[in-house]
Image: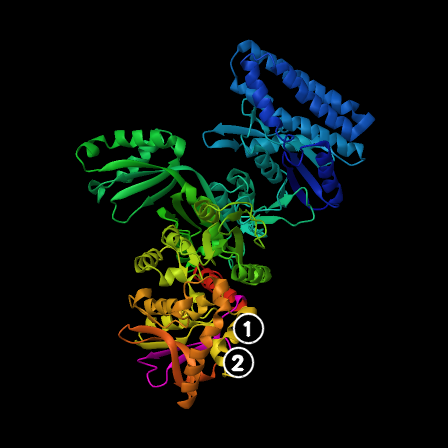
């Protein structure tokens, strides 16, 4: 006989005839094992038995039909598995079912629910399912021996749960084993007897506990808990779909996660294994080829954090007052009062000042907790030594767990940084001296977002940013395309999930829970309030809106979005060059959400970044000059006077270099806006009205229709040719230049520059910006490159998005 392995199969694993057949397949496939097999009732049967018992006690006339339906369900499963050979097991089932009906009739006669009878009845599901599995195995010609746990297992029921009488249980088991072949034993889970011989149960999760108990009694080398998941995950996959499977963890780690609500395995289940050093393995009945998660005494401590869990339905109870400082026994009185009131404390936090004691309790017990504490501290409350006993409802606890956290610097810092970046406030903190667990109390409404943020913060999953795009025009569509092309690489190599969940035009929008690759799915009228609320979803840690519109109305919402923690990236120049009061409000609000607008000047060129670096490192900006229009740069780089200026403007329009109405470029206002943006970044309170702008559009053509303007465009040729001829006579070239001096004076216009000037040798649509500073006084710093076109502008937007992602903890 080979290794002794205990197997425990849960209700989902035993839920149907097909699933019971699958359990048998697993057992038969594992050759060379002595198998100790403990099974739960079929899925939902235990709940059904409890419900029927209570209905019988209430004399509900429907209970006999429901009981018969449950009995028939088990008969049908036996018939499906055994066919014509089902007779013997059905007879065994019927004997148990007949006894059950008599007990239910007794309940109906008494008219009250008897706890003793309820224990007997609710444990019958395991008796039924184990009989069926045992018969099915024997029907396949496989060795199988059925053991009713009620014949050997003895427990004491205590307030802490069922405590096994190991000595007496072992004696009974040894007597039962005598002379029997023990290749494979099928055992009823959950049920047992007390010292007086009365049938009872091990309580909820009792079948898992049975598996560990019988693994210990039979001296198993390993206990395998078979369920419907691949093993223990780093977080609840319903909340964090990116949760990763843990291959190994310690008993202590599993206990910590289980205590804080993770559906790992009940701590009580682990006790028999822990005491005897028996490894537990959590495996998937429906994917038996997967190795699962191994839980044992020690684990790999090189990964500091193994799991993160959060659970809600809690409340914060705070006892606060100066009279508590330095007074011995205050904590003892508080927790003694809670004990007397039957209130279980989930978490405790106390500052070193002793000014307050904070406890987290179940929300349903908060009222009782407050009443108990008010009675215990009545004298101190009356004399104002204790100011108040306050209840804060709507609390969740998030716990970060891992043996490797002990002695690893920076764990707490990373936890609180992740929460801060997700704009989540921490109400209370607790950490044990083992350093295995850090727990924080937060608002329950933030729980899912916090879980995702912290999970990503410890690189257990990708950092997820919910993205909304406004204005899917040329630049917006190109940004979406660039993002879609790089999205998988960012997920795989950088742990960053940029998820575009909303796209809006001026009239329509599309909201989705999944990534939108394009703007083709716009389906409903645009409502930017709903749009922003959807982007800032409670279940996602970070939100970011990209505004690619040219609207002056959308920037009105930036300050509100930023104050709510929504990050904003934009090439929209109205935000930086519009009303000064609005710009300053945006900057003030950018303490919670981050604001990036690199592509407002120079498209993808690092113009604003360079300026900020100069200022942030203490340099003094003396002057800024530049060619900020790719359209005007192309016109004056190309025009030599051989071709009429109007012809060149029309060619630029055909090439897509100009706006639909070329006056938007020729007026110089776009250049002026960019200069205002740079001036404000440099610290000057410049307004657009303060900029002296030379428009290349004659006064007579400024108010005519676009069509008439294009028709009369040759009226520009004469004056422009005169300017060019004068420049050539002076040995100069014409360039449309923006200038800002140290006094904050700003102007844009057509100027003559010497042929040796840096601006005289740019390439076609190049933008060029020259910073004269205290450090770069005699040889100014120049940033030059393509400054127009959807590809480079979208790349600038994408770069800003990635800069924000990096500030949130992405590995970039």
Residue 511, position in %: x, y? 53, 47
Residue 740, position in %: x, y? 32, 74
Image quadrant occupied by the N terminus: top right
Whichever of labels 1 and 2 marks the residue nearer the N terminus, that label is 2
Q: What kind of element bears circle 1?
A: helix
| Front-most of residues 559 and 398 | 559
Magenta range is 763-790
Query: Is 767 in the magenta?
Result: yes
Residue 514 in sight from this viewpoint: yes
Query: Is 290 in the magenta?
Result: no
Q: How many marks can you see?
A: 2
Location of mark 1 (residue): 651
- Asked which quadrant contains residue 629, the reply is bottom left
- Asked which quadrant contains residue 672, the reply is bottom left
Horizontally, residue 101 falls left or right of residue 450, namely right
> Marks 1 and 2: which is nearer the front?
2
Horizontally, residue 765 falls left or right of residue 316, namely right
Label 1: how many residues lie within 10 Å, few (<14), some (14-19) or many (20+)? some
| Front-most of residues 265 and 381 | 381
Label 2: how many residues lie within 10 Å, few (<14), some (14-19) or many (20+)? few
Location of mark 2 (residue): 643
Residue 340, position in %: x, y? 34, 29
Residue 755 in sight from this viewpoint: no
Q: What kind of element bears circle 2?
A: loop
Distance from Cα at disc 1 to Cα at disc 2: 11 Å
């Amino acid at each position: 006989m080979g290794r002794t392995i205990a197997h425990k199969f849960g209700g989902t694993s035993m839920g149907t005839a097909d699933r019971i057949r699958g359990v048998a397949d697993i057992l038969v496939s594992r050759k060379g094992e002595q198998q100790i097999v403990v099974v739960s009732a079929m899925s939902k049967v235990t709940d059904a038995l409890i419900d029927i018992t209570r209905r019988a006690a209430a004399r509900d006339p429907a209970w006999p039909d429901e009981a018969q339906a449950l009995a028939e369900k088990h008969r049908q499963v036996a018939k499906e598995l055994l066919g014509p050979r089902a007779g013997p097991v059905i007879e065994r089932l019927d004997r148990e079912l007949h006894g059950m009906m008599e007990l239910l009739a007794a309940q109906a006669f008494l008219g009250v629910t008897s706890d003793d009878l309820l224990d007997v009845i609710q444990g019958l599901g395991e008796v039924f399912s184990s009989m069926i599995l045992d018969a099915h195995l024997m029907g396949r010609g496989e060795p199988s021996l059925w053991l009713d746990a009620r014949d050997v297992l003895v427990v004491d029921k205590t307030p802490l749960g069922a405590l096994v009488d190991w000595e007496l249980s072992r004696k009974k088991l040894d007597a039962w084993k005598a002379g029997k072949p023990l290749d494979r034993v099928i055992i009823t889970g959950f049920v047992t007897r007390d010292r007086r011989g009365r049938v009872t149960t091990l309580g909820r999760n009792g079948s898992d506990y049975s598996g560990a108990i019988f693994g210990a009694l039979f001296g198993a080398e390993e206990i395998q808990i078979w369920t419907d998941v691949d093993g223990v995950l780093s977080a609840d996959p319903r909340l964090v779909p990116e949760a990763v499977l843990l291959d190994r963890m310690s008993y202590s780690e599993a206990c910590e996660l289980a205590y804080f609500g993770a559906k790992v395995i009940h701590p009580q289940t682990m006790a028999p294994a822990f005491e005897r050093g028996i490894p537990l393995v959590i495996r998937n009945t429906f994917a038996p080829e997967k190795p699962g998660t191994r839980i044992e005494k020690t684990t790999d401590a090189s990964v500091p954090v193994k799991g993160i869990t959060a659970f809600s339905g809690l409340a914060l109870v705070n006892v606060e007052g100066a009279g508590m400082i330095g007074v011995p026994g205050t904590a003892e009185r508080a927790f003694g009062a809670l004990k007397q009131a039957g209130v279980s404390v989930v978490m405790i936090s106390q500052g070193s000042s002793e000014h307050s004691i904070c406890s987290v309790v179940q929300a349903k017990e908060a009222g009782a907790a407050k009443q108990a504490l008010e009675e215990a501290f009545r004298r101190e409350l009356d004399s104002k030594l204790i100011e108040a006993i306050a209840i804060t409802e709507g609390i969740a606890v998030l716990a970060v767990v891992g043996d490797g956290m002990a002695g690893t610097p920076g764990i707490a810092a990373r936890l609180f940084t992740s929460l801060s970046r997700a704009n989540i406030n921490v109400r209370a903190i607790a950490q044990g001296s083992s350093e295995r667990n850090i727990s924080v109390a937060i608002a329950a409404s933030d729980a899912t977002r916090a879980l995702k943020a912290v999970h990503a913060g410890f690189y257990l999953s990708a950092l997820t940013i919910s993205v909304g795009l406004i204005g899917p025009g040329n630049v917006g569509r190109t940004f979406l395309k660039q993002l879609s092309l790089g999205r998988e690489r960012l997920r795989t190599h950088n742990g960053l999930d940029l998820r575009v969940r909303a796209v809006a035009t001026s009239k329509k929008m599309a909201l989705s829970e999944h990534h939108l690759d394009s703007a083709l799915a716009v389906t409903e009228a645009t409502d930017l309030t709903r749009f922003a609320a959807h982007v800032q979803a409670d279940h996602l840690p970070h939100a970011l809106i990209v505004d690619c519109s040219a609207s002056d109305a959308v920037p009105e919402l930036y300050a509100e979005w930023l104050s709510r923690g929504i990050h904003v990236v934009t090439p929209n120049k109205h935000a930086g060059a519009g009303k000064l009061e609005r710009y300053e409000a945006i900057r003030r609000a950018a303490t919670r959400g981050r604001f990036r607008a690199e592509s407002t000047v120079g498209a993808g060129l690092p113009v604003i970044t360079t300026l900020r670096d100069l200022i942030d490192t203490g340099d003094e900006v003396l002057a800024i000059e530049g060619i900020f229009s790719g359209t005007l740069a192309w016109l004056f780089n190309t025009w030599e006077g051989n071709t009429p200026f109007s012809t060149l403007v029309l060619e630029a329009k055909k090439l897509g270099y100009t706006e639909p109405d070329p006056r938007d470029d020729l007026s110089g206002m776009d250049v002026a806006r960019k200069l205002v943006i740079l001036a404000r970044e440099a610290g000057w309170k410049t307004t657009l009205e303060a900029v002296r702008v030379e428009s290349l559009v004659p006064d007579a053509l400024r108010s005519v229709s676009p069509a008439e303007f294009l028709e009369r465009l040759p009226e520009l040729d004469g004056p422009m040719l005169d300017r060019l001829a004068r420049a050539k006579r002076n040995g100069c070239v014409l360039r449309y230049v923006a200038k800002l001096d140290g006094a904050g004076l700003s102007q844009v216009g057509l100027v003559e520059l010497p042929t040796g000037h840096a601006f005289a040798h740019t390439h076609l649509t190049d933008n060029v910006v020259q910073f004269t500073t205290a450090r770069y006084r005699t040889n100014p710093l120049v940033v030059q490159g393509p400054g127009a076109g959807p590809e480079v502008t979208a790349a600038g937007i994408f770069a800003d998005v990635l800069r924000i992602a990096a500030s949130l903890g992405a590995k970039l």
